[in-house]
Image: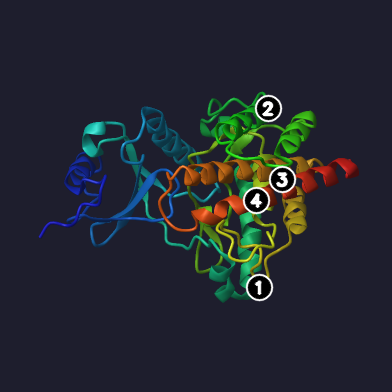
Amino acid sequence: MSPEHPPGLDLDRLRGLLDAERPGLVGGPLSGRLIEGGRSNLTYAVSDGAATWVVRRPPLGHVLATAHDMKREHRVLSALHPTAVPVPRPVLLCEDESVLGAPFYVMDFVAGTPYRTADQLAPLGPERTREAVLSLVDTLVELHAVDPAEVGLADFGRPEGFLERQLRRWGKQLTASRGRELPGIDELHALLGGHLPTSPAPTVVHGDYRLDNVLIGADDQIKAILDWEMSTLGDPLTDLGLLVMYCTPLGMPDSPVSTTAEAPGHPAPAELVERYAARSGRDVAALSWYTAFAWFKLAVILEGIHYRYTLGQTVGHGFDRIGDLVPVFIQHGLATLRSGLQEG
């Protein structure tokens, strides 16, 4: 009886490739299943009954530009795996689209839990929750300590003008998804543009660093950082600002956006920033700008989802409430930036 083939994953062709490229790796018939929760790329768990691997590929019907993501993700994993940064071991990259219909890569499966909500963290209890979140900061420090040139990533991005380009990019995204009045968002965008900080030395930046993009092991330590599709060389404080934003309570019960900040024992954002500064040695005086930028970026992303919802282009539950979050994110962004400017 042949194992089921999930959409986008031809197990026979995959087995043939693995046998040719990594002889002896696979010991028995392959079975596969789609892992839910990925953002844009598809992720599958594949097993021969004894060992398990993970396959990452672009979504079905992908456009050519996303094919590049696979090579970039595989490259950053390959570069970071020998370092102290916990990432899955890459097995192979396949750019031959005749195998699965798109470029893809294979990596080792890492056991662990991606905690997405305060309710999921609650069973750990306050002390273990605190340790898990603090280890998130410590691991980010390890990532930002990697010398890009030493691991072959000197040309992985364009750090010059990084913040200006980011702000311009998300401003364009906002223009593309404007379907209603959003009080305060133009003011926030203008304030961010008028007070750009001077970036520290560039590092490898994850681009979407938060608790549900890492796997936490039974010992409450981070076993792997996942979802590297936004990674580049840039300003490391953008990662910290985004993490601080995700660790700030929204004050909205049943929020459709994942947040763990309300979990008992969760450290306050100020403690996370202090820990990062102490361990990394970086100046975090301008962090309010980076956190405000994170609020702006997420407001734009959520408005894009809301806009597609109003056009009937989204499928699934919870999209009807996304639009209510956007003004909350705008106000958080304005309050954060104004507070930082007053202190400065």
* Residue highlighted by disc 1: 127
- The answer to the question of whether label 1 and label 3 lie on touching residues, with beta carbons closer than 8 A, is no
Nearer-N-terminus badge (2/1): 1
**Mark 1, secondary structure of its residue:** helix
Looking at numbered disc 2 in the image, what kind of residue is underneath it? Answer: Glu
Residue 243 tag number: 4
What is the quadrant of the N terminus in the image?
A: bottom left
Q: Percent x, y for residue 168?
A: 64, 28
Where residue 122 sits, quadrant-wise, is bottom right
Q: Nearer the viewer, mark 1 or mark 4?
A: 4
Q: Percent x, y for residue 121?
A: 57, 69
* Residue highlighted by disc 3: 291
Separation of marks 3 and 4 at Cα, in angstroms: 8 Å
Residue 56 tag number: none
Question: Which residue sits furthest left?
Answer: 1
> What residue is at 21 percent from the left and 45 percent from the top?
10
Looking at numbered disc 1 in the image, what kind of residue is underneath it? Answer: Glu
**Mark 2, secondary structure of its residue:** helix
Q: Percent x, y for residue 135?
A: 62, 59
> What residue is at 40 percent from the left and 43 percent from the top?
41
Separation of marks 4 and 2 at Cα, in angstroms: 20 Å
Q: Nearer the viewer, mark 2 or mark 1?
A: 2
* Residue highlighted by disc 2: 164
**Mark 3, secondary structure of its residue:** helix
- The answer to the question of whether label 4 and label 2 lie on touching residues, with beta carbons closer than 8 A, is no
Instruction: Report if residue 262 is visible in the image.
Output: yes
- Graded by Cα atoms within 10 Å as few (under 14), some (14 to 19) or many (20 or more), the crowding at tag 2 reads few
